Image (spheres, helix red, strand yellow):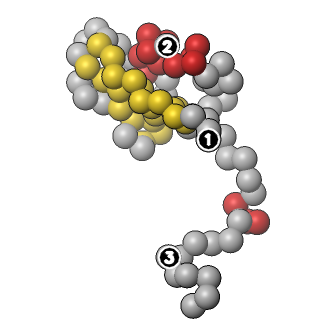
Amino acid sequence: MRIGVAYSDGVRQTWLRIEVPEDVTVVQAIERSGVLGMFPSIDLETQKVGIFGKVVKLDAPLKTGDRVEIYRPITCDPTQVPRRNGMADDE
């Protein structure tokens, strides 16, 4: 079956489309995709992963067409970042 694996490190991003067996899990798809070699800083022990924006465990099964996403850790304090409400600064 065909699935996608997506990751961005803030500078580079990639979306890999790969063929995997029917019974593949999230972690197996990530390993097969080669993304870990492209981004050695990925740490699956600490980083969250998801399918189409929903956080899942590494052993979650995949379905045809799923997009596996590897999420970066939050690097800023959300309480210190100005809230964006869609309004221009001069309004």
The reply to whether dot 1 and dot 3 touch (C-beta < 8 Å) is: no
Circle number at residue 10: 1
Label 1 and label 2: CA atoms lie apart by: 18 Å
Residue 51, picture quadrant: top left
Q: Nearer the viewer, residue 58 or 77?
A: 77
Image coordinates of residue 21 in percent, x first then y, are: 28, 8
**Residue 56 relative to residue 11: left or right:** left
Label 1 and label 3: CA atoms lie apart by: 22 Å
Q: Secondary structure at mark 1?
A: loop
Name the residue that disc number 3 marks. Answer: 86
Q: Amino acid at mark 3?
A: Gly
Rendered residue at 42%/42% (across/down): 54
Q: Is residue 36 above or below residue 70?
A: above
- Asked if residue 23 can be seen in this view, the reply is no
Q: Amino acid at mark 2?
A: Gly
Residue 83, picture quadrant: bottom right
- Asked if residue 1 can be seen in this view, the reply is yes
